[in-house]
């Protein structure tokens, strides 16, 4: 990620909102968590950035993005609700494969 004093533009794919997280909810988590967990593929060709945190409403979200030269592209955001079996599977995977 960029220097903490540098503001990075954030863009969103349509899929980033399909689980009900709004732009405001996602930005709230990014700001609250700060540095993401970094997951690099086995072949080192792709890097995912994961944030797990609570938004400004007190709702836990998981957010995944990829860093582009001039912006952060958020491609996934999902409410971490108990009704989802394996709700922490992404977090546990990110933690186990963090670079």
Image: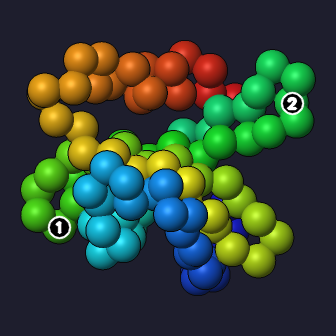
Please give the count of numbered marks on the rendered protein.
2
Q: Residues within 10 Å of mark 1 (few under 14, many from 20)?
A: some
Q: Residues within 10 Å of mark 2 (few under 14, many from 20)?
A: few
Quadrant of the rendered image containing residue 34: bottom left
Q: How is the image coloured?
A: rainbow
Report the residue at 13% width, 26% height from top.
83
Q: Helix or strand or loop: what does disc 1 sit on?
A: loop
Tell me the CA gap for discs 2 and 1.
34 Å
Q: Position of residue 35 (x, y in %)?
A: 52, 54
Report the residue at 16% width, 35% height from top.
81
Q: Position of residue 71 (x, y in %)?
A: 69, 74
Report the residue at 81% width, 19% height from top.
42
Report the residue at 15% width, 52% height from top.
59
Q: From the viewer's perspective, is residue 11 above or below residue 1?
A: below
Q: From the viewer's perspective, is residue 78 above or below residue 40?
A: below
Of the numbered discs 2 and 1, the one sitting upstream in the chain is 2
> Image check: 62 left or right of 67?
left
> Residue 56 shows which numbered tag?
1
Q: Position of residue 84 (x, y in %)?
A: 22, 26
Can residue 4 be seen by looking at this rendering?
A: no
Closest to the observer: 31 or 69? 69
Residue picked out by circle 2: 44
Quadrant of the rendered image containing residue 21: bottom left
């Amino acid at each position: 990620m960029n220097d903490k004093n540098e503001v990075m533009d954030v863009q969103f794919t349509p899929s980033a909102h399909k689980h009900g997280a709004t732009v405001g909810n996602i930005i709230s988590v990014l700001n609250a968590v700060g540095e993401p967990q970094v997951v690099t593929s086995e072949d080192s060709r792709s890097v995912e950035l994961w944030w797990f945190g609570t938004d400004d409403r007190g709702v836990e979200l998981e957010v995944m993005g990829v860093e582009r030269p001039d912006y952060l592209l958020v491609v996934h955001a999902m409410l971490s609700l108990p009704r989802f079996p394996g709700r922490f599977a992404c977090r546990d995977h990110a933690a186990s494969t963090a670079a």
